[in-house]
Amino acid sequence: MKIEFEHHQGAHCESGVTSNLLWQTSGGKITEPLAFGIGAGLFYVQVPFIKINNGPAIAFRNMPGFIFNRTCKSLGIPVTRKKFRSKETAARFLDDRLEEGIPVGCQVGVYYLPYFPKEYRFHFNAHNIVIFDKTGDIYTVSDPIMELPSVLTSYELERVRFAKGALAPRGHLYYPSKKVEINDQTIKKAIKSGVQKNVFNMLQIPGPFAGVKGIKTTGLKIKKWRDKLGIEKAGSYLAQMVRMQEEIGTGGGGFRYIYAAFLQQAEAYSPGNHLNDISVLFTTAGDKWRESAVHAAGIYKGRLGTQADFNAMGEYLVEISEIEKNAFQALKNIKWR
Amino acid sequence: MKKDEVPQDLGALGKITKELCYATDNNGKYVAEQSIGWDVKKSALDVAWGDIEKRIAAAKQKVLDNSASPVLFFMEYRLMDTAILAGYTGFWQWQIKRHTNPRVFNKLSPKTLQKYADAFNVSIDDLKSMTVHED
């Protein structure tokens, strides 16, 4: 069965997938920034004592599936989510949905993803794509990172759906179970709920490791990296951080810009709440994230390396933490009308 | 970030697809803009791969010195840690650690070796001889 589905490129895989899956029902109204904001996409956590790929465990995003789930729920759209133990059942379930004409969101690992460049293939398991056609043994998939749809054989798809390691997808599939009419009023309500959830995640999670406090904690730690780890390892740590921060599908600067774009678009649905003004604060934060990445590059390329440079590096994050605290505080104080 | 400040430094991904980012136009309005890459990200990726190459080379030397088995080499080559390898093979992590000992490795059954070969996507002969093919 031919499935009606349009591929649109996105800046982040999950908000892109969410927007693409809801494109039909919403008549294109749920753009990527709206999906990102309603899904409360901004997040930060540095998990203490744990290392990933021999570097610090920093995450700029929530658990896989969070944005999609949250966006749909806020819009009143019921969601089906499924993980599988058996590869055969997982394949059959997917084929049945495609047979029914439903495009399906799918969590995959990127290590064996054939259309990705080799340099990008790490054991990273929280990537998202939409599968929207099967012809013979070939699946057509919409990867929001790519400009055009890509293809996977059933074997290739099985391998990435059952990638192993942290956050193993275990065949994870998700899609809206039912077509629901979305009007501007629903979107307005969903925007409010998304903003409030994001305020909670960034300001109100207890402890020093998550949200804006987490950003500050990392900043303070970075100042000690040079003495603690030695210049070379500290450089590798910073490089890892920048990759988590600015690379496709994840984000420091990139995420702040999506969020700022979200607030601008939200203004149209929810005027009178100064969302446009607050958007500017997130642009400032995004610019600072990017500046910090440039500074970090100076260190891991060996151009910079004194303790003063590390202090400045840490100071960037402390400053960002402050900017974002104010930005989210402003969102928190909105008297929604 | 302004639209005309979106970096355009060709990177590994840029050769295959442009990436999308959001930036502001002259009126401060956000628009979607494509980028072919950014030097800062490219060099971060280079550092990561430089570290990996070093780890692979160190593992290879250990195998040649007979102080580790090819399991360690391929683990580094496939960017895995014992947890990931345990996921792919079904072995316990302590078993994998044991199998990185060359004396233990040399006594492994063909069935066990096949599980490692599958996980690393190589043949058993290549596994034993540390032969890699570009894929």
Image (tube, grey):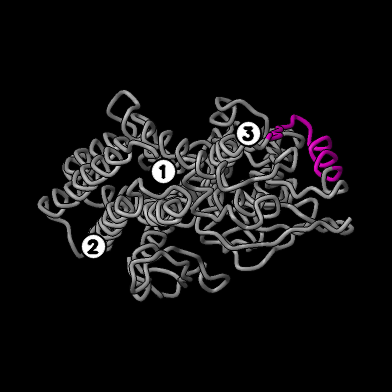
Front position among marks 3 and 1 = 1
Determine whether, in the image, residue A315 is placed left or right of residue A92: left
Q: Are marks 1 and 2 in contact (CB under 8 Å)?
A: no
Q: Residue A38 at what x, y percent from top left? A: 50, 43
> In terms of secondary structure, where does tag 2 sit?
helix
- Magenta range: A78-96
Q: Are marks 1 and 2 on the same chain?
A: yes
> What residue is pinned by disc 3?
B87
Q: Could you tell me which chain the residue with mark 2 belongs to? A: A
> What residue is pinned by disc 2?
A298
Label 3, label 1: how far apart the Cα atoms are: 30 Å
Q: Residues within 10 Å of mark 2 (few under 14, many from 20)?
A: some
Q: Are marks 3 and 1 in contact (CB under 8 Å)?
A: no
Q: Quadrant of residue A328?
A: top left
> In terms of secondary structure, where does tag 3 sit?
helix
B25 falls in the magenta region: no
Q: Residues within 10 Å of mark 1 (few under 14, many from 20)?
A: many
Q: Callout 2, which amino acid?
A: Gly
